[in-house]
Image (cartoon, grey):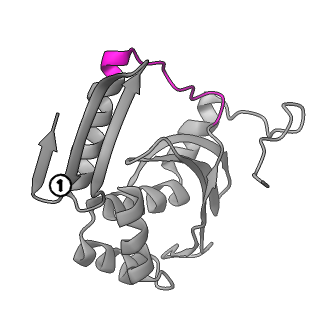
């Protein structure tokens, strides 16, 4: 199976300093990305369409809405590189542990519209380790996730967690119905 890999530490780009991060956050690319992220995360087609018209005319609205439905939106996690017209950073899907790297590129001249915004899945960065959960925390988190996804119509089926022959959690779920044991 072929998967993207993290570059060896000696080849990875240097971390941005606090001053560079502050300057990047004040820049046009970050402001455009933040506005896109807010509109995207809203899940509101009208709001995303208004953003498209003003800031990203080449954006495919249907694809964006489909992407939003699959990811649940994104949480901004980190900045990696910045120039006057480009910004690269990390986001994490709201509905999973999946991380992605984004690069937003804006026009150099006013009104600085977005020309490109690829968002590509990457392996979880080492600086964002997964916190271990106790058995009880895992069951609570799983129940919450399954119930949320079933209510949203993203999951229909059964869930079963057992340990050494003992059922810890089970249930059958679909939209508007839940049968737990």
* Image: magenta residue range: 125-137
Whether residue 43 sits left or right of residue 98 in the image: it is left
Q: Residue furthest right?
A: 10
Q: Residue 97 or 141: which is nearer the viewer?
A: 141
Q: Position of residue 173 (x, y in %)?
A: 21, 51
Q: Residue 151 or 19: which is nearer the viewer?
A: 151
Judging from the image, what secondary structure is the residue with disc 1 in? Answer: helix
Magenta-colored stretch includes residue 7 = no
- Label 1: few (<14), some (14–19) or many (≥20) C-alpha neighbours in 10 Å: some
Q: Residue furthest top?
A: 134
The image quarter in which residue 79 lies: top right
Q: Residue furthest left?
A: 176
Q: Quadrant of the N terminus?
A: bottom right
Residue at 64% x, 35% y: name it: 125
Whether residue 98 sits left or right of residue 19 in the image: it is left
Q: Considering only vertical position in the picture, is 64 above or below 58?
A: above
Residue at 51% x, 85% y: name it: 58
Q: Position of residue 18 (x, y in %)?
A: 60, 29
Q: Considering only vertical position in the picture, is 138 above or below 82?
A: above
The image quarter in which residue 129 lies: top right
Q: How many marks?
A: 1
Residue at 39% x, 14% y: name it: 134
Magenta-colored stretch includes residue 136 = yes
Whether residue 123 sits left or right of residue 28 in the image: it is right
Residue at 60% x, 66% y: name it: 118
Q: Residue 71 or 30: which is nearer the viewer?
A: 71
Task: Report the residue marked by disc 1.
Answer: 151
Q: Position of residue 93 (x, y in %)?
A: 45, 49
Q: Quadrant of the C terminus?
A: top left
Magenta stretch prevailing secondary structure: loop
């Amino acid at each position: 199976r072929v998967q993207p890999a993290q570059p060896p530490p000696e080849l990875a780009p240097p971390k941005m300093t606090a001053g560079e991060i502050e300057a990047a956050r004040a820049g046009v690319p970050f402001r455009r990305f933040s506005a896109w992220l807010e509109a995207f995360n809203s899940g509101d087609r009208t709001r995303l369409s208004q953003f498209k018209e003003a800031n990203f005319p080449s954006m495919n609205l249907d694809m964006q809405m489909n992407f939003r439905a699959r990811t649940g939106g994104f949480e901004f996690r980190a900045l990696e590189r910045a120039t006057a017209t480009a910004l690269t950073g990390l986001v994490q899907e709201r509905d999973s542990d999946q991380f992605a790297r984004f690069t937003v590129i804006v026009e150099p001249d006013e009104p600085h519209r977005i020309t490109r915004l690829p968002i590509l899945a990457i392996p979880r960065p080492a600086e964002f380790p997964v916190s271990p959960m106790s058995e009880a925390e895992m069951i609570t988190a799983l129940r919450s996730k399954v119930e949320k996804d079933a209510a949203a119509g993203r999951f229909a089926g059964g869930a079963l967690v057992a340990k050494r022959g003992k059922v810890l959690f089970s249930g059958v779920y679909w939209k508007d119905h839940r049968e737990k044991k």
